[in-house]
Image (cartoon, rainbow, N blue to C red):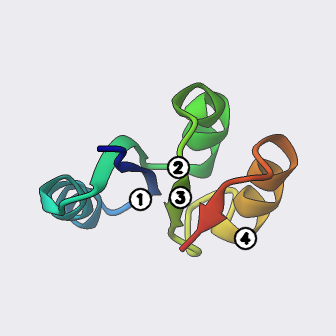
Amino acid sequence: IMSLRVSIVEDDDRIRESLIVLIDGAEGFRCVSAYESAEDALSDLKLKDPDVVLMDINLPNMNGIDCVRKIKSTLPAVSFG
């Protein structure tokens, strides 16, 4: 059975860890990566090849909107939430 591959970009440690637990505990979903910054996500995300990225908009330095634009240019098939 194929699971939907999910990556998380969230700077709040507690929220990020909670999302990992929720996603990994849900049937049909698997958290393949989690990042605390847009910069970390951009440097590694292509290697993880997620189906979906859960993106925090209010990130320090580069915000989530700018990060989504950059990810879409390298991984056009990825969906965002």
Gap in angstroms between the C-alphas marked 2 and 1: 6 Å
Q: Earlier in the sequence, mark 3 or mark 4?
A: 3
Depth order, front residue of 44/62 = 44
Q: Residue at x 53, y 74 (%)?
A: 81
From the top left corner, tell me how far across and down residue 22 is, in percent: 17, 64
Gap in angstroms between the C-alphas marked 4 and 2: 12 Å
Secondary structure beneath dot 3 equals strand
Q: Nearer the viewer, mark 4 or mark 2?
A: 4
Gap in angstroms between the C-alphas marked 2 and 3: 17 Å
Q: Residues within 10 Å of mark 1 (few under 14, many from 20)?
A: some
Q: Which residue is mark 3?
A: 52
Q: Nearer the viewer, mark 2 or mark 3?
A: 3
Q: Earlier in the sequence, mark 2 or mark 3?
A: 2
Q: Residues within 10 Å of mark 2 (few under 14, many from 20)?
A: many
Gap in angstroms between the C-alphas marked 1 and 3: 18 Å
Q: Which residue is mark 2?
A: 37
Q: Which residue is mark 1?
A: 11
Quadrant of the frame with the N terminus = top left
Gap in angstroms between the C-alphas marked 3 and 4: 15 Å
From the top left corner, tell me how far across and down residue 80 is, in percent: 60, 68
From the top left corner, tell me how far across and down residue 73 is, in percent: 87, 48
Type of the residue with mark 1: Asp
Q: Earlier in the sequence, mark 1 or mark 3?
A: 1
Q: Is residue 65 left or right of residue 25?
A: right
Secondary structure beneath dot 2 equals loop
Q: Which residue is mark 4?
A: 65
- The answer to whether the residues at label 2 and label 1 have Cβ atoms under 8 Å apart is yes
Depth order, front residue of 19/24 = 24
